[in-house]
């Protein structure tokens, strides 16, 4: 019985290999134009941040007051979106286990360019209090490119708002190049990801 | 509670009876008696709630300890049934037929301690750790710090200080200098 099943598995390809469901082309680097149009793009992108409502760890608790009346990130022109395909700002809000990292990578790759990442809390910087855990990563920037870190355990919503300001400054200066960096060092990022995700059951790049 | 303990002692040869509080008792039974004991407590004594099922690693005794914590809603008492199993090829009878919720505990223990529960549904599927290839991480011979340093790219700059030395430096700076050979004598006030 088991032998038959094994043979079936060999023949039937899993869903994620279906080219109709996923585009498996690798990411491409988009060179910057060094002119006034690029500056206009940067200014426009800095003021059009749509964050992905994805919570991992304790930081997701700190993100909820941001949407509400007291801190209200709408006044900065930032709004949460439910799906990665509609958003361009990814906040990794706390410790990342290996199981979560898999979902983070899939969500990150599905986001549209240009895309930005904020690492919230010490756990994304060096592992924080979970630095010696068997199941949480230590450095987020080895798996996806990170634009801004907000240190603290946990940082308050005000700190996150300061982080948004910093990110806007970076984008206006033309340094919000996470997606290009990911495309440029794609092999390095993939090798790091595959080192810790042992059951890799998804396409190498999907969007 | 006293009568219950007597019944358990006569029926299931319960040992190491420890009354933690007047409504909470620990008992230890043999591995073969465990399912009967838990079933008896559930069906005849009213302990209908499985609060938790967990495992402990006694690496010195070469044994795993399994703890079944049961609660009685009618008289608000708890019984914790313990049993010891061998550490080599550990296998335990599944109580999934008594409480469906035991499935989650058993899958978790299978993944974190490597104790097998034959008959428990989906016990071999990955639960919290996906694609784990090392020895089960909650066993005490697993070195979590070493594994983390080898796997997760530790950021340099983390250092530890000896607690006693650090407090000496903070509270008695002059004495610490003398002790470390920096100054010669302690100035008296």
Image (tube, coloured by chain):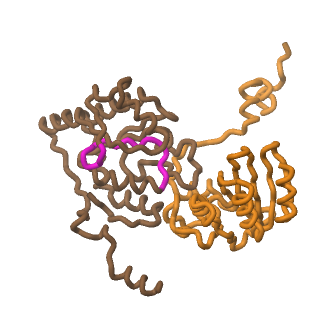
Chain colours: A brown, B orange
Residue B37 magenta-highlighted: no
For the residue pair B117 and B69, the one nearer the viewer reads as B69
Residue lying at the far top in this picture: please name it.
Answer: B189
For the residue pair B99 and A192, the one nearer the viewer reads as B99
For the residue pair B45 and B121, the one nearer the viewer reads as B45
Q: Is residue A50 left or right of residue B60?
A: left
Picture coordinates of residue A123, whole percent (x, y): 50, 43
Q: Please tell me how many numbered marks the rendered image carries.
A: 0
The residue shown at (24%, 49%) is: A112
Q: Is residue B44 left or right of residue A56?
A: right
Picture coordinates of residue B106, whole percent (x, y): 61, 62
Residue A95 magenta-highlighted: yes
The residue shown at (42%, 59%) is: A193
Q: Is residue A50 visible?
A: yes
Picture coordinates of residue B48, whole percent (x, y): 66, 54
Q: Which residues are magenta?
A: A82-98
Q: Quadrant of residue A191?
A: bottom left
Q: In what quadrant of the picture does the C terminus of chain A appear? A: bottom left
Picture coordinates of residue B25, whole percent (x, y): 80, 50
Q: Is residue B57 visible?
A: no
Q: Vertical placement of B88 versus B129: above or below?
A: below
Q: Is residue A128 left or right of residue A8?
A: right
Q: Vertical placement of A38 versus B87: above or below?
A: above
The residue shown at (78%, 44%) is: B23
For the residue pair B158 and B74, the one nearer the viewer reads as B74
């Amino acid at each position: 019985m088991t032998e038959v099943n094994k043979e079936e598995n060999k023949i039937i390809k899993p869903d994620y290999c279906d080219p109709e469901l996923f585009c498996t082309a690798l990411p491409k680097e988009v060179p910057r134009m060094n002119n006034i149009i690029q500056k206009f793009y940067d200014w426009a992108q800095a003021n059009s941040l749509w964050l992905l409502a994805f919570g991992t760890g304790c930081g997701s608790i700190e993100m909820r007051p941001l949407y509400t009346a007291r801190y209200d990130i709408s006044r900065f022109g930032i709004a949460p979106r439910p799906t990665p395909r509609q958003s361009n700002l990814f906040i990794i809000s706390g410790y990342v286990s290996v199981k979560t990292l898999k979902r983070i990578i899939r969500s990150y790759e599905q986001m549209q360019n240009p895309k930005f990442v904020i690492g919230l809390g010490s756990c994304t910087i060096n592992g924080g209090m979970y630095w010696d855990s068997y199941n949480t990563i230590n450095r987020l920037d080895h798996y996806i490119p990170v634009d801004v870190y907000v240190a603290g355990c946990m940082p308050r919503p005000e700190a996150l708002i300061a982080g948004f300001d910093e990110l806007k400054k970076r984008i206006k200066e033309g340094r919000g190049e996470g997606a290009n960096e990911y495309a440029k060092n794609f092999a390095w990022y993939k090798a790091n990801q595959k080192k810790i995700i042992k059951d890799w059951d998804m396409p190498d790049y999907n969007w | 509670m006293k009568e219950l303990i007597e019944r358990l002692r006569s029926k299931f040869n319960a040992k190491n009876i420890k009354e933690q509080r007047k409504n909470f008792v620990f008992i230890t039974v043999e591995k073969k008696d465990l399912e009967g004991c838990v079933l008896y407590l559930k069906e005849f004594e009213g302990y209908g709630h499985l609060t938790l099922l967990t495992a402990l690693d006694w690496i010195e005794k070469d044994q795993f300890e399994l703890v079944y914590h049961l609660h009685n809603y009618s008289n608000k008492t708890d019984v914790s049934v313990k049993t010891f199993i061998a550490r080599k090829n550990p296998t335990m009878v599944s109580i999934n037929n008594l409480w469906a919720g035991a499935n989650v505990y058993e899958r978790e223990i299978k993944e974190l301690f490597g104790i097998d529960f034959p008959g428990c549904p989906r016990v071999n599927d990955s639960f919290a750790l996906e694609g784990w290839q090392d020895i089960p991480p909650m066993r005490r011979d697993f070195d979590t710090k070493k594994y983390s340093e080898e796997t997760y790219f530790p950021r340099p700059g983390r250092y530890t200080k000896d607690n006693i030395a650090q407090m000496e430096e903070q509270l008695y700076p002059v004495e610490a200098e003398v002790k470390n050979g920096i100054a010669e004598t302690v100035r008296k006030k």
